[in-house]
Amino acid sequence: MLLLAIDQGTTGTTALVVEKSGKVRGRGTTEFAQHFPKPGWVEHDVREIWASVKESVKKALAAAAITGDDLGGIGITNQRETTVVWDNKTGEPIHNAIVWQCRRTADECQRLKDAGHTDAVRAKTGLVIDAYFSGTKVAWLLDQVSGSRARANNGELAFGTIDSWLISMLTQRDKHVTDVTNASRTLLFDIVRMQWDDELLALFRVPREVLPTVVESAGIIGHTRGLDFLPDGIPIAGIAGDQQAALFGQACFEVGDAKCTYGTGAFALMNVGQRPVMSTHGLVTTVAWKVGGHVTYALEGSSFIAGAAVQWLRDGLGIIKHAADIEPLARSVSSSDGVVFVPALAGLGAPYWDQNARGTIVGLTRGTTSAHLARATLEGIAFSVLDLLSAMVQDAGRPIERLRVDGGAAKNDLLMQFQADISGARVERPHELESTGRGAAMLAGVGLGWFEPKAAASMLSIERSFAPAASEQDVTRARHMWQDAIARARST
């Protein structure tokens, strides 16, 4: 039997047919539209997401030359904080989903911070009060869609992140659940007591009636039913938010293991074990997974812009035609010649949390070329990740000796080598860069009882390692230049 992983991301859905060994037998990917009703607002039509899921699954099954009858289970991973509210009976959304990138509730978040709630919220959730997370998005939907708050109080509506909504659709609304990793991204979930918290619900004005049941990350929680693209009865046995799925997929099972996903943004996580470590250096604390009754926690830092900076060079400045062109262009010069690019094109995430910061380029001269800017862009991505890793080292009180990487930008050898140089950690890149989908499949295999969690580590195969090679003097000088540029980019 085979596993189906549904990786529902921000710009598209990927479905993977995965063997027990971890080998990908078939793959299908379908993009969907991004909706920007106002500056800073980002929405998804979840009906378009559902269509992308169906199409991607059909492509993956065809590529694997199998039918749905050959599937033994399904694992789901998803863009995490994106928020959906739908009708319990019909499954129809009351509004487009509000995407994790959306900043429409930033003013409400600032009001809550000004009212002095930051420390209490962090103590329970491990998070900062920010529009990134789901809590204020739910309240906005209930307030802005006429009649929705009354309907929510009457139990007519359901809230969930994308995993919840997909499971509802896959089971014909038989199950309204989420797993602990996604619950931990809502600002509504106490990660110590591992349950929805009444004080947080009151603070963010979210009625308990709309909440899903919280389940473990591995275990059978429902079965497919009434679908036109999959047979009835396939168990759904694994769920995790995308970054936690990647941590699991990268076999980061020991305390201190860390990974970074280089996608549109960059997301670094470190396994900190079975007790939460509350950050004092600008990171968030999150649930990594819960399997077999045991909870594992992680420190997480998010840089909002990574691969998106390369897209900006391509689409905004036109200095490259394809994203892959950046590496040969950057390699055509031996250094950035003093040019430093802080890619704060959507503000700064962790560890600064400065939504008003702006992208900044310093060190320009008449001799600066597009190649210098290309190299500075890759270095800026790596330095943004270094800030996350440095905060993790301080919070966890242990060095990072090995960093496992995935995501599209991890294909860039120059970026990976520079990351190793400035961090002092060995960077390991697996053959399969879709660690989120692999993690979802691994969790489903565990949930089905096919193998134990740590046995899933054998599914990981390293393609290349990058060892630190720069001199201490060069690294120190580059770090000082980066900190100077960050100071210029920040709004305060």
Image (cartoon, rainbow, N blue to C red):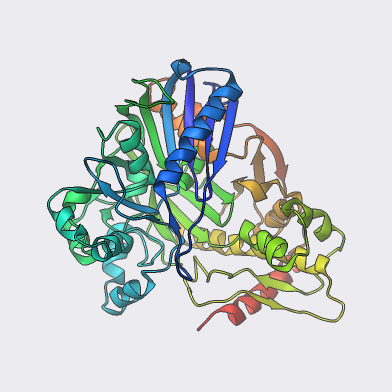
Residue 361 in the figure: left or right of residue 148: right
The location of residue 394, given as percent across then percent down, is 50, 62
Q: Residue at x 27, y 76 (%)?
A: 116
The location of residue 195, given as percent across then percent down, is 23, 48
Is 366 rendered above or below residue 253?
below
427 or 434: nearer the viewer: 434
469 or 331: nearer the viewer: 331
The location of residue 478, given as percent across then percent down, is 72, 70
Q: Residue at x 60, y 64 (%)?
A: 384
Q: Residue at x 81, y 68 (%)?
A: 370
| Residue 253 visible within the image | no
- Where is residue 484, by image quadrant? bottom right
Q: Residue at x 62, y 60 (%)?
A: 308
The location of residue 250, given as percent across then percent down, is 55, 39
Is 313 rendered above or below residue 463?
below
- Where is residue 273, by image quadrant? top left
Is 85 rendered above or below residue 353?
above
482 or 62: nearer the viewer: 62
How many numbered marks does the figure carry?
Answer: 0
| Residue 150 visible within the image | yes
